[in-house]
Image: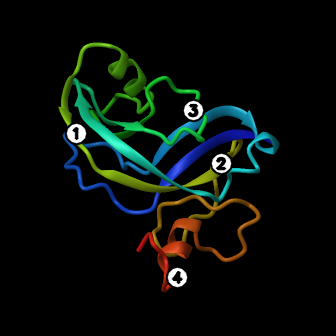
Amino acid sequence: MTGILWAVLLEPLSVQPLYPEGSPHHITLQYGVEREHWENVIGLPMTAGVLELCHNDRIQAIRVALPTWVQCQNPNPHITVSWVTGAQPVEANVMLNGPHHSEALNIPVHTIIEWLEWGDPPKRICSKCKVAALGKNNKSGVCSRCQRNSQPNSKYR
């Protein structure tokens, strides 16, 4: 099963978007990889540190620092925040490697590591947040982020 390993935000970002497009919701960790190699981290909580808020004239992203136990293919781990109409979220990688404006930030971002299988777009979304895609094995109809947030003693509430 090939897909994307990503860290999905457990709470909304407190960053004002600069551009009209976008819905910040994840940090891409691995892209185009087999699920079986990542079973040991799927479902684990992870806290990333926000280093800076960056933008150019097309895209806005937050550069993050990941814990040492997290493997990331991307040399500039980030959360894409917003972009102009016609731009693509993947342009954040190019922006972070080139000239851009930045402002230092120092806030934690709580996430949970999840898997998204490649293929047809997910047909089901979370019944609570109406954003997160549900895997085909999810029988509850609620994403793991919303499940954790509804637990009375969750540290991510």
Using the image, determine if residue 130 lies above or below residue 43: below
Give amino acid for label 2.
Leu
Give amino acid for label 3.
Cys
Spatial CA distance of label 1 from label 2 is 26 Å
User: What's the mark number on residue 72?
Assistant: 3
Give amino acid for label 1.
Tyr
Q: Could you tell me which secondary element the residue under label 3 belongs to?
A: loop
**Sequence-first tag of 4 and 2:** 2
Spatial CA distance of label 4 from label 2 is 24 Å
Spatial CA distance of label 3 from label 4 is 29 Å
Which residue was labeled with disc 1?
19
- Residue 49: horizontal and vertical position, in percent? 37, 45
Of 132 and 150, nearer the camera is 150
**Sequence-first tag of 3 and 4:** 3
Which residue was labeled with disc 2?
116
Where's the N terminus, which quadrant? top right
User: What's the mark number on residue 151?
Assistant: 4
